[in-house]
Image: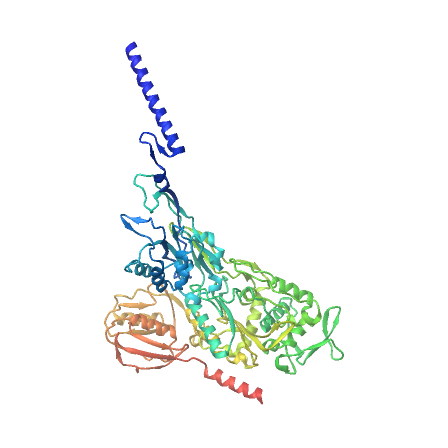
Amino acid sequence: MNKSNNRLKIVYFLALTFVLVCIVNVFIVSIFKVHVRSNTSLEPYIESVSLVSEKIYAKRGNIYDTNGQIVAQDERTYDIICYLDDSRKIGNKEDFVKDPLFTAQVLAVYLDMDQADIYYYLTYNPNLYQTELGLKGRNLSEETKDAIENYEGLQGIGFKESNRRIYNQGKNFAPYLIGFAQSDEQGKLVGKMGLEYYLNDELSGIDGKHIYQQDKYGYILNGMKEEIYPATNGYDVYTTIDTSIQQALQTAFDDVESQNNASKAWGAVVEIESGKILAWGQTPSFDPNVLDIENYNNMGSQVPYEPGSVMKSFIYAAAMDLDVYNGTATFDSSPYCYLSNGNNPYRSYGSNLGCISNAAGKTWGTIELDYGLIYSSNVATSTLLSDYVGTDRYSEYLEKFGFFQNVETDGIGEVPGIKHYTWPSEKLSLTYGQGSSVTMLQLLQAYTAIFGNGEMVKPYYIDKIVDSDSNEIIYLGNRTVVSKPIKESTARQMQALLERVVSDKAGTAKYYAVDEVDIIAKTGTSEIVEGSGYNSDDSITSVMLAFPANNPQYMIYFAYVSPYDYYNHTFSTPIKDLIRRTAILTDVGYKANQNQINNTITKDVMPNLVGKSSYEAIDLLKNEYNTDVVVIGNGDKVLKQYPENGEDVYSKSKTFIVTDTDNIELPDFTGWTRKEVIIYWRLSNIAIQMEDYGVAYEQSLPKGTIVNKYSEIIVKFKNIDSKVETEIKQDIQEDEE
């Protein structure tokens, strides 16, 4: 028993001695950097090892249009690293920049940098272990990286992965809403403007970490501790912007520049009931891929301006809503000269403080109040203010309509504008949109009440935010009713009057009428503030419109700056083309077809015709569904159909069945809408080139021609209503006389 205890004591003593020796050895190594047993200095080894904590950047979320098309995404790129330390080796081979001049000459070709700048980076500090080459050495494509790596004789060059943001539509996809993101000094993408800035946290995700040990040459030591904390990628953002409608708006900007000599233009398309912004833009603009930004201001929300006669709708709406309006009541359309009771103006035919005239000094004698809006009379709105509505109540309505206050939607940068409403002249001029400034965003919001059911709906463009990993919806945009400034009956009364602004022979908006859809509208022409006065050379031409007229669903606002011309509204082709394209893309129906629609039209559900005999299908669609059947091919059975099974089908509309796609007898496209020709094209696989918009009137191959997928056909559409064009010319001649 004692022997056993003695043995245990000896073992215990030896173990304790070993532990003490180890502790002393570790202490000496850590303090003096010397291995005790071999008396070897460990300093060179310790200095060659470093602990690295490297960020793993999260993938920035994608940005999509309303149809799920990517408009902004990350692209893997590479940052160049130049190793300068002459002790750096890979294996036994030296790998550092041995010849800075040669290296600078080669890299200058691939990096679009000045050779002298690269040489400076490589030589300005001889003590650097490595260096990067500034912004132009970052975000290199894989092709550029491979070309540099494969260049014979080049050494000491390495790369690290990075990301850059790619905007697939460039300047054509609302860059002042979407904004842009850039890499910071650490290579992290950071939102700098627009949605990219507003939702930077949601898009960025959470970066991870890679912690490891490496030697001075960058090698990770085997067997050493390595920890990885994965990144959490950013959320995806879906917008309400429709790429096709956005491109149509951009085309209108380009056309108004070339055709109307416009120096600036801005506009938007909005779904009235929901407030969804389908398109938004301005010119001049910028491409977020190259950041050729000359002006950072969003003209639709950050540049208040005097809007002109589009404001007249609100004094008319106020009078109707107060039940003091009688459209057949008359007023004197000659210049409105005024005196004031306090600061409230009233009409005077003798001494006065000033006079309000109509555009170009026009007068129409004694006319009805309805025609005051149809003709866009400044005297009419002045009369409504002083004789019917009153200055205080009009001010209250302007507040109800949200003017001179921020809309506060989806992080859009705003300036509220300035309300000048103290003196009689300021109160009168605000009724026709001069003297005070508002923004396009405020106008869009206010007009949702007039074009809708009296409820004012906030415009928005962020549809939803989605976790791409789980498909969980983090945020969902919704219709937001800000207030109800007018009754629904007032909105309907206003819509009826605005329809006459287009349809009446003397209406100022008649120049915007198109074949495709009936519209309601109000035009505007305004002077531009410059210094302490107004610019005498340029003016703002604008129009606010909605369609279809009998049940407005979409609204367009378009404004541009150009040399003043009383007839600017007659040069309306760019905006009419925008209306046509938007009507087609939103599928709201066509005026040409609407003229045939009456109360007997019916809606039904399209049956499944695929596999049925062509004769049975034709008989069913013609006799039971009362449709105009278009047969593609000469086969016996139905291969395809439009509308598809289960979709809505309307009587008196065109339906399509495909029985053969090899040899097809061409129909007569005369009178077809562009959408109907597109449907035929997709079903038949025949290449059809379409020119202009509207209703088809000419085709390159006659009816009955046998065609196939190799055939090429041109179909031309009416681009302008010849009747309207004739009226424009007659009006100009009458005015000049």
Outermost residue on the top side: it is 2
Q: Please give the name of the residue rendered at 49% of the width and 56% of the height, measured from the top-left corner.
A: 198
* Residue at the bottom extreme of this rendering: 737
- Between residue 130 and residue 19, name the one nearer to us: 130
Picture residue at 53% right of the left edge, 87% below the top: 730
Q: Position of residue 361 (x, y in %)?
A: 64, 82
Can residue 122 be seen at all in this image of the molecule?
yes
Q: Which one is in front, 560 or 661? A: 560
- The figure's colour scheme reads rainbow
Q: Quadrant of the N terminus?
A: top left
Q: In which image quadrant can residue 492 be found?
A: bottom right
Above or below 114: residue 162: above
Q: How many marks?
A: 0
Q: Nearer the viewer, residue 678 or 29?
A: 29
Quadrant in the picture for residue 657: bottom left
Image check: 328 left or right of 654? Answer: right
| Residue 206 percent across, percent down from the top left | 43, 48
Observer able to see residue 72: no
Provide residue 625's location: percent of width, then percent of height: 35, 70
Residue in front for this viewpoint, 81 or 345:
81
Residue 458 relative to residue 18: left or right: right
Question: Does residue 308 appear to the left or right of 581 in the view shown?
Answer: right
Which quarter of the rendered picture does the C terminus lie within? Answer: bottom right
Percent x, y for residue 87?
Answer: 33, 48
Q: Quadrant of residue 18?
A: top left
Is 179 rendered above or below residue 728?
above
